[in-house]
Image (cartoon, rainbow, N blue to C red):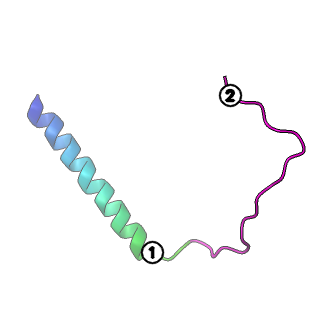
Amino acid sequence: MFSLIALYFAYRRDVVTAERYIAGLTPAAAPVEQEASPVVLDTPLPLAA
């Protein structure tokens, strides 16, 4: 059972590494058109319980 778990996580590690590598090779989908600016709210948001 341990070997199956080890194989699964080794596979996932390889997949994540490959996804990061491929994502680094491809250009960005679209350039950022404008900078983000903070939004000022009139009323504060309620806190989560």
> Which residue was labeled with disc 2?
48
| Farthest residue, direction right | 42
In the image, 28: left or right of 36? Answer: left
Q: How far from the left and from the top, in percent, is residue 14?
A: 24, 56
Which residue is painted at 54% across and 73% down in the image? 28
State which quarter of the image contains the C terminus. top right
Which residue is painted at 72% across and 75% down in the image? 33
Would you call the spot at circle 2 few (<14 residues within 10 Å), some (14-19), or many (20 or more)? few
Q: Secondary structure at mark 2?
A: loop
Would you call the spot at circle 1 few (<14 residues within 10 Å), some (14-19), or many (20 or more)? few
Q: Could you tell which of marks 2 and 1 lies nearer the N-terminus?
A: 1
Task: Give the residues in magenta.
Answer: 29-49
In the image, 41: left or right of 47? Answer: right
Which of the 4 quarters of the picture holds residue 1?
Answer: top left
Which of the 4 quarters of the picture holds residue 15?
Answer: bottom left
Q: Which mark is residue 26?
A: 1
Please, what is the dominant secondary structure of the magenta stretch?
loop
Which residue is painted at 90% across and 45% down in the image? 42
Q: Which mark is residue 12?
A: none
Q: Secondary structure at mark 1?
A: loop
Is residue 45 one of those drawn in magenta?
yes
Q: How far from the left and from the top, in percent, is residue 35?
A: 72, 71
Q: How far from the left and from the top, in percent, is residue 25?
A: 40, 75
